[in-house]
Image: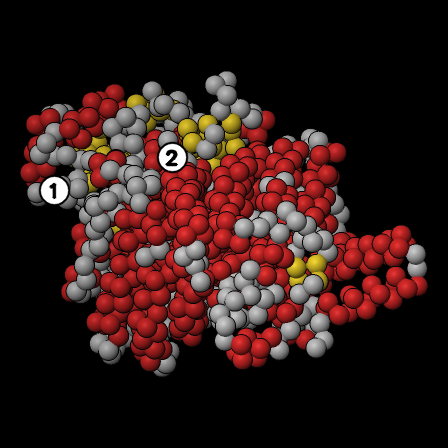
């Protein structure tokens, strides 16, 4: 079976035969870095194109269809355009922070890539506290937005940043609590262990209704955390023109733009890993024959299929719903989602203790 | 200049919404004083698209000035032209052929639907939902195609002339209008599914921008803005012109006074317009489409006032004539100007995000406000 | 309510008012000094109840200015037109924005376009013209703008 893990194993064994262990480590790191950056660029291009095609499909129009076959090179052309544009810095801006903000946004998105298992045995860093790492790093995202909003010296940006701060800090709670539901059930913080615990069925099917509720809350919370519509108050273009990135142009803007899409990818990958089994094929209990048939589909296809399904879901939200108002947004979190997810976590814990799941 | 002041002594921030801002649909400039997210004061600064149409009309003949008025409220240009034509006809005492009257009303109601379609899409876009805009344009394009075929233009039609309409309707007109009505009826459910019934949308609209009936009258609000507060102000019913009194349609009234009521008034009004069109489309009388008028029109000395109902409210055309070939003074009482004056009253104390909902449901067209 | 009855009622209010014949609606000629008091009565008198000021404008007759108020009653649906003659040199009249709120914007427009000074107006500033506009008022008949105005 052709798979990523085989390629990486072959590469690893060849390198360790040829070079000393230190050099092997260095070369592997360089390769991994190149792979991440390539994946980044590729994901950015694919997701932007996908967003535009999904939007076009929902809005009864065609979407990009001129540049390249079926408009496939449209986002590449846009990137080139943004690259050659002048990156302006406003006079009154805090120049250091202003230029730092998009880089931090990008760095956070890159760091989040580390513990994700793209296929079976194909992971940059098998971290034993993967879940904790992801939740901790993803909250750094707010720093870059606050930084951008503050340093721009623009009232729209400032208001967008303040909104975003309130929003991300609140929604992290319910996102974290819904992730905790899975941690409780699989009794591990390691993403790989969590995937392995779903070998006889994904948590969303095994965990009854409480896990399904946790999944719903997770999707809502991460949509808010990534500042996507209907929670895109930070850049509410009809109120704040463009919110925190009003003053950004050229490649600095593109970095924010790219970081948003990478973040969407990552939260969907986490969601797919926790609730839909990551790269784990669709297995049903002890139906060995069925499970075996499912194993023939490569694990990377399972992973990307699930992730892109969740991404599609989030895009669907964006092109269907109107935006919430700031007080309604916070009401939703503090009055509804947080109490529900706390109670839900209690139920899940009870379920895990009594072993009431499949 | 306002731009130099960034905050008030009380510590409130002043921000400029517009003249170039996505929510203002043009070049409206609002100076907003906010405390956190709460609006303290909204101060409109107008005039960015002021062309002084009133002054311009003073040097144009009674045939010419009608074309300028298409540029006021460009979304209901037929109705603007209609108002001017009616006012001139009132002064000249011309009888309009019944065919022209029916065509005029058909065009008015099609324009009203097209205007409300655009408003519906643009308002949903203000609230952050992009998709309705495209869905609304699907139907609006069908109307524009009908207009293009008969009038030769899609936006500023200049179709109404004193004495009737400029030319006869296109042979396809009736068929295409019927096609449009069929399309409209098959798609109208989408509107309620996508927007009206959406819980987020309702939360954004209900209780936002309250305007009481007494305030609506005092501020001179008309059209759907006032009817959302329960004020009966449909000129087509109250002071009927052309053959509106013979037609069956309801004046839509909602009593909520909030943005959602104004929204519902417009959505329901589209159905009434379709009802009017259905009554007339098969009953266009034969005959002339234009009354015989002199080449140079001269109005007798006096004052003439015509009120009509545009998509946004009451448009008044006030012509003061000295007996010459050009008006001595023209005043256009535009609906948007009065509706906008209520914005400050409505917006105080609400959140910044509510402002776009209010501006959306006031249905502001800036050239109509500035003239 | 017919025009005759309205005319009679207004005459009762203020016997000195002159009525103008021959136009669409009942037209009143009012002295500028009496206008604010009459306006308050027109608005508050229960059987008149002119609560809707649907048009407020000014006409430049070269020798003088005339303020024109179109009033409607949403209860009884009767309309009247009130005309107030003003001096050309220093036109001033009491504001009615405290009676009809819509007058606020309309009076600001008349103020900048015709130079009519509305006394006791809460916020008499330029509305449509750019900040710092100086010189002649654009809607006056003797306004000249050699750059932007084309003479036919």
Q: Is residue C149 visible?
A: no
| Horizontal side, residue A245 vs residue A340: left or right | right
Q: Percent x, y for residue B362?
A: 36, 46
The quadrant holding residue C69 is: top left
Decide which of A266, A214 is in the foreground and name it: A214
Q: Residue furthest top?
A: B9
Instruction: Indicate the chain on which mark 2 is placed.
Output: B
In the displayed structure, would residue C131 be above or below residue A134? above
The answer for how far apart the CA atoms under marks 2 and 1 are is: 35 Å
The quadrant holding residue B279 is: bottom left
The residue singled out by tag 2 in the image is: B350
Q: Percent x, y for residue A107?
A: 71, 46
Per the rendering, the mark at residue B221 is none
Q: How is the image coloured?
A: secondary structure
Q: Residue furthest front?
A: A354
The residue singled out by tag 1 in the image is: C76
* Residue at the (56%, 49%) spot, across then down: A226
Q: Percent x, y for residue B36?
A: 47, 29
């Amino acid at each position: 079976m052709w798979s990523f893990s085989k390629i990486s194993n072959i590469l690893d064994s060849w390198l360790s035969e040829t070079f000393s262990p230190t050099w092997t480590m260095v070369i592997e790191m360089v390769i991994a870095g190149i792979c991440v950056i390539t994946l980044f660029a590729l994901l950015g291009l694919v997701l932007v194109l996908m967003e535009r095609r999904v939007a076009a499909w929902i809005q009864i129009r065609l979407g990009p269809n001129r540049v390249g076959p079926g408009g496939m090179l449209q986002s590449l052309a846009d990137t080139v355009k943004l690259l050659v544009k002048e990156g302006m810095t406003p006079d009154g801006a805090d120049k250091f922070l202003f230029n730092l903000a998009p880089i931090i946004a990008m760095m956070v998105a890159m760091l989040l890539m580390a513990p994700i298992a793209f296929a079976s045995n194909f992971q940059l860093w098998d971290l034993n506290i993967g879940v904790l790492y992801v939740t901790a790093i993803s909250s750094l995202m707010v720093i870059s937005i606050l930084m951008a909003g503050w340093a721009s010296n623009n009232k729209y940006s400032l208001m967008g940043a303040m909104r975003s701060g309130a929003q991300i800090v609140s929604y992290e709670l319910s996102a974290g609590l819904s992730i905790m539901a899975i941690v409780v059930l699989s009794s591990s913080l390691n993403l790989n262990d969590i995937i392995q615990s779903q070998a006889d069925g994904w948590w969303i099917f095994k965990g009854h209704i409480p896990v399904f509720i946790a999944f719903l809350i997770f999707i809502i919370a991460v949509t808010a955390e990534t500042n996507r519509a209907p929670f895109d108050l930070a850049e509410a273009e009809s109120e704040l023109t463009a919110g925190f990135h009003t003053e950004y142009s050229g490649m600095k803007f593109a970095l924010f733009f790219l970081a948003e899409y990478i973040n969407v990818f990552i939260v969907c990958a986490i969601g797919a890993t926790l609730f839909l089994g990551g790269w784990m094929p669709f297995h049903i209990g002890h139906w060995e024959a069925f499970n075996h048939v499912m194993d023939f589909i490569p694990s990377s296809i399972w992973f990307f299929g699930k992730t892109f399904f969740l991404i599609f879901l989030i895009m669907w939200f964006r092109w269907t719903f109107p935006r919430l108002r700031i007080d309604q947004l916070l009401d939703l979190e503090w009055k509804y989602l947080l109490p529900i997810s706390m109670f839900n976590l209690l139920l899940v814990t009870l379920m895990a203790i009594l072993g009431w799941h499949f | 200049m306002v731009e130099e002041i960034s905050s008030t002594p009380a510590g409130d921030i002043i921000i400029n919404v517009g003249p170039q801002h996505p929510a203002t649909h043009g070049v409206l400039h609002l100076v907003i004083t906010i405390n956190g997210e709460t609006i303290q004061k909204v101060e409109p600064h107008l005039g960015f698209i002021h062309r002084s149409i009133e002054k311009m009309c003073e040097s144009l003949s009674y045939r010419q000035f009608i074309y300028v008025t298409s540029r006021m409220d460009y979304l209901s240009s037929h109705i603007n032209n209609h108002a001017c034509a009616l006012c001139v006809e009132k002064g000249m005492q011309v009888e309009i052929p019944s065919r022209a009257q029916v065509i005029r009303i058909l065009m008015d109601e099609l324009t009203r639907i097209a205007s409300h379609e655009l408003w519906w899409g643009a308002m949903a876009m203000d609230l952050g939902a992009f998709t309705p805009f495209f869905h609304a344009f699907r139907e609006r394009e069908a109307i524009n195609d009908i207009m293009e075929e008969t009038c030769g233009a899609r936006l500023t039609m200049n179709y109404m002339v004193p004495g009737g309409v400029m030319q006869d309707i296109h042979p396809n007109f009736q068929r295409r209008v019927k096609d449009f009505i069929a399309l409209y009826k098959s798609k109208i459910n989408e509107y309620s599914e996508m927007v009206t019934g959406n819980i987020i949308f309702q939360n954004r609209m209900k209780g936002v921008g309250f305007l009481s009936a007494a305030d609506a009258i005092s501020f001179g609000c008309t059209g759907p803005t006032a009817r959302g507060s329960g004020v009966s102000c449909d000129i087509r019913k109250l002071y009927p012109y052309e053959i509106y009194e013979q037609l069956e349609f309801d004046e839509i009234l909602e009593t909520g006074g909030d943005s959602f009521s104004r929204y519902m008034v417009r959505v329901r009004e589209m159905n009434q317009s379709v009802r009017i069109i259905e009554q007339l489309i098969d009953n266009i009388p034969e005959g002339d489409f234009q009354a015989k008028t002199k080449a140079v029109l001269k109005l007798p000395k006096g004052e003439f006032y015509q009120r009509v109902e545009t998509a946004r409210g009451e448009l008044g055309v006030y012509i003061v004539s000295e007996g010459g070939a050009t008006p001595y003074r023209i005043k256009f009482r535009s609906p948007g100007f009065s509706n906008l004056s209520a914005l400050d009253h409505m917006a105080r104390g609400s959140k910044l995000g509510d402002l776009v909902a209010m501006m959306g449901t006031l249905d502001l067209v800036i050239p109509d406000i500035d003239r | 309510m017919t025009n005759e009855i309205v005319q009679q009622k207004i005459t009762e209010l203020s016997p000195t008012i002159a009525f103008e014949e021959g136009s669409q609606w009942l037209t009143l000629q009012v002295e500028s000094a009496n206008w604010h008091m009459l306006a308050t009565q027109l608005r508050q008198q229960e059987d008149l109840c002119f609560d809707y000021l649907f048009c407020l404008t000014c006409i430049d007759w070269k020798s003088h200015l005339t303020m024109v108020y179109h009033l409607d009653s949403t209860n009884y649906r009767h309309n009247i037109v009130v005309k107030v003659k003003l001096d050309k040199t220093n036109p001033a009249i009491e504001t009615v924005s405290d009676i009809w709120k819509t007058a606020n914007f309309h009076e600001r427009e008349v103020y900048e376009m015709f130079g009519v000074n509305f006394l006791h107006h809460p916020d008499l500033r330029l509305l449509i013209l750019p900040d710092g506009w100086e010189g002649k008022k654009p809607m006056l008949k003797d306004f000249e703008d050699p750059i932007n105005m084309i003479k036919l």
